[in-house]
Amino acid sequence: MIGSTPGRLMILLAAQIVAAAPSAAPATGEEVDHRAQYAECMDLVGKDPERAFSKAIAWRDLGGGEAAEHCTATALVGLEIYENGARRLEILAETIRADAAIKAGILSQAAQAWLLAGDAGRAEAVASTALNLTPGDHALFVDRAQAKAARRDYAGSVGDLDRAISINETSADAFAFRGSAKRYLGEFSKARADIERALTIAPRHLDALFERGILKRLSGDKTGARTDWLLVLEIDPLSAAAESARANLEKMDVAPD
């Protein structure tokens, strides 16, 4: 779930993290537009994380401060150097001069990075810390639910997703991931209901489409499963959901019923 940077965090960071950058001009005497530097650096994270990392390091030397550090850490995650990026995000959340929402947002990114690094326990702990800061943030419950699911604590995952949905009944992510967790618990009809609800909210939700394909396949509807998985590939062929869909299509073709 981690991207170049979540929109809700980007907006807040532009206002607060950039304001925390040193106001003094660098040794070159040039005046630096930190807000513009931050926007450009974070935009590069999604397109070319290697360039984003280099830019962040250079900008840091020009007084980029905490904003540059955030771009550096996020670029490391984009480069799949997950553990290093996660640690730097955690440190930044602890030290940044910003409000609880900013700290929680950065911890959310750290939790996602730990999950990508394969450390679900650390991801869950970091998400819990973020929830202590902003207990009404439904997205953080989704983050923690994913970490619990990665540890195969599907009942715990459903519990967190129930709380996320109670806060925000229009969260397609929460319904999609709850549907997946319920499938692992063997609650197939409830899982399908959650997936359909997610797709009502967001018809092109990749994880929900992939999960519906799994449920169709389990019910013997191979044609329906293929349709959903091919749609995932059509929408975003480079996504993680597409990679999973492709693997399932190959498996179904090699070992048909």
Image (cartoon, rainbow, N blue to C red):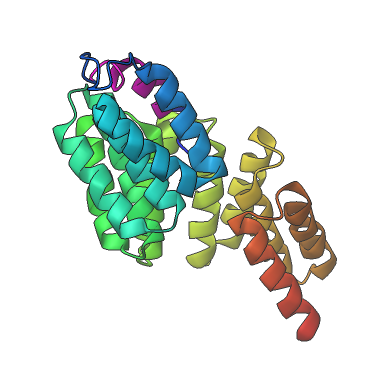
Q: Residue at x 22, y 13 (%)?
A: 23
Residue nearest the observer in this picture, 162 or 113: 113
Residue 239 seen in the figure: yes
Was residue 19 drawn as part of the magenta stretch in this picture?
yes
Q: Residue at x 61, y 41 (%)?
A: 198
Q: Is residue 55 left or right of residue 226?
A: left
Quadrant, the C terminus? bottom right
Q: Is residue 37 left or right of residue 121?
A: right
Find residue 242 and report its image quarter.
Answer: bottom right
The residue sitting at the right extreme is 223
What percent of the width, then of the height, locates residue 62?
28, 27
The residue sitting at the left extreme is 95
What percent of the width, then of the height, locates residue 174?
49, 42
Vertical placement of residue 53 versus 190, above or below = above
- Magenta stretch prevailing secondary structure: helix
What percent of the width, then of the height, locates residue 155?
37, 59
- Total count of labels: 0
Residue nearest the observer in this picture, 143 or 67: 67
Q: Is residue 202 left or right of residue 224?
A: left
Residue 157 seen in the figure: no
Vertical placement of residue 81 versus 252, above or below = above
What percent of the width, then of the height, locates residue 82?
36, 57
Residue nearest the observer in this picture, 252 or 3: 3
Which span is picked out in magenta?
9-20
Q: Residue at x 45, y 36 (%)?
A: 5
Residue nearest the observer in this picture, 16 or 186: 16
Vertical placement of residue 242 versus 142, above or below = below
Was residue 74 drawn as part of the magenta stretch in this picture?
no
Find residue 32 and report its image quarter.
Answer: top left
